[in-house]
Structure formats: structure tokens, C-alpha cells
Amino acid sequence: MVSFSNVPLIESRNQVSYGDYFIGLKRDWGTKNGLHPVAYTYKGSDYERGVWDLMRESALGQTLHLLKEHGQNGVNFHFEGDPLKNLSELNFEQLTDNNIQALERIFEKTHSQMYDMILYLKPYIVTDSKGQERLAYNDREWRYIPRHVEKKIIYETDASGNEFNKEFAEWTKKSKPHYKENPLKFELNDINFIIAKEQNEIHIIYKILFEKYTKEKVIEQITNGQLIILSLDKVTSDL
């Protein structure tokens, strides 16, 4: 995924440090490219519990043919808690193979949709790399999650919870971005502002923009008030 912050510039320095250089893109650009705000939640909330309940039910619902097969072999199933207990109320004797296949396809689609929802969940309080808790809710995060990338959960440990997962270790070593090609493109008219670290670096920003978009177009955007170029030291000290 690629994460963005929707924090107003004047508030950004009071939040987590994103570095010393900023590119402010228009919100319309984000919606056109499929970015979406995350859903902040907390452990034990009704919202989070509901999502994970549906995730578990839809996962188990894809194995109805196995449940029927084991039931015919004398194995009794008893599921505790909502919503899994609903599956234990199914009368498999009245379900044909076609019925079961249709239900499994429905559960499979639901499971995939719930997976997509989970990718937009985020705790409203997180721990940073220094071990300090911070209020992630103030980031107003938007995420881009590409549809062409296969979704997969890589757990830190194995199923027993005792052995460290080597695949997880390898993944965490990879540097970002993890895409072979940048999936997000933007043009000059998509940019609201650019901020360099220091005032003496602004001429470099101009040079890059002139080379990429031509001097005439860049000056036109600035003159029309569509593009602002500032330095961080100017923002923090004078604005």
C-alpha cells in the first residue's frame, strides 16, 4: 500500500514527522486514483469485532462441502459465538451439492470483500519505531491499495505461535516501495504545493519542474495560485 496524510499543513508538524520534504496533491487526484480514508478503530470495538466475525464466518463458509462430508461420517460440529454458530444450524441433509457450491461461492465473495475492508482498518493509537505511543487518528490517513497485487497475509510466527516465520523475516528486510513500477502518476495540475527543507533549495525544485513540465506551464500555475512552493524553515518560522 501507499499511505497519505490528509492533515492540514499548519498541523502537520505537530503530528508524526514525515520528513522534511512535502508534495501536496489535490484530494480529487486521490479519489480518481482509488485512494480511500482508513477506518480507525480499537481492540474490542463493535466495529472491529463485526469485521473479524464476518471474516471468520465467510472463511468457514467456503468449506461447507467438507462439513457435510464429515457430518455424514458421524462427526458433530458445534460452533460457539456469533456468527459462527449460525453454520451449525444448517441442515446438510436438505442441501444438494449444487446448493452447497452456490453458498460457497457467496461466502468466497464475501470473504474477499471483507479482506479488502480489513486492509483499511488501523488502530487509532499506534507504537512508533522508538516504542512511543502516538495518536495515529490525527494523521487522517488515506491509503492506496492496488487491485492488481495479490493479497496475502504473512504472519510473524507459524500456526503454533512458537516458531518465527522465515517468510515474514524476509519480507521485513525488503526496502520500500515494494512495487516494480510506480502505480501512481500525477501531473503538474494535480499538485497543490511543494515544500523543500530549506529556502536555498527552492531553486532546485524550480529547475526540476521546468525540465519536466516546461517553464511556461509552471509559471502559469504559480501565477494563477494553483501551485505554491515554500521551504519548511519558512513555514515553521514565519507562517
Image (cartoon, rainbow, N blue to C red):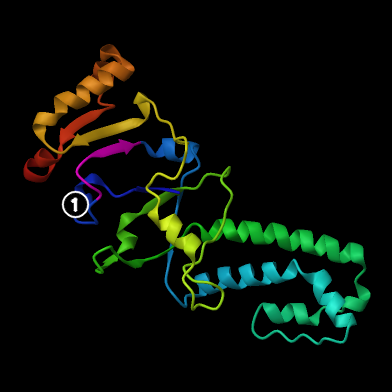
Residue 6 on the magenta span: no
Q: Amino acid at mark 1?
A: Arg
Q: Measuring from the top left, give residue 52's x and y in whole percent.
A: 57, 70
Identity of the residue drawn at 10% across and 41% down: 233
Left or right of 179 on screen, residue 73: right
- Quarter location, residue 15: bottom left
Identity of the residue drawn at 49% across and 74% down: 163
- Quarter location, residue 238: top left
Q: Helix or strand or loop: what does disc 1 sit on?
A: loop
Q: Measuring from the top left, give residue 107's x and y in whole percent.
A: 73, 63
Left or right of 12 on screen, residue 231: left
- What are the residue bounds of the magenta stretch? 18-25
User: Please, is residue 119 above or below residue 96 in the view?
Assistant: above
- Quarter location, residue 105: bottom right
Of residues 71 and 61, the one drawn nearer to the viewer in this rendering: 71
Q: Measuring from the top left, give residue 98's x and y in whole percent.
A: 90, 62
User: Please, is residue 210 above or below residue 227 in the view?
Assistant: above
Identity of the residue drawn at 76% across and 69% down: 63
- Residue position marked by numbered label 1 in the rendering: 13
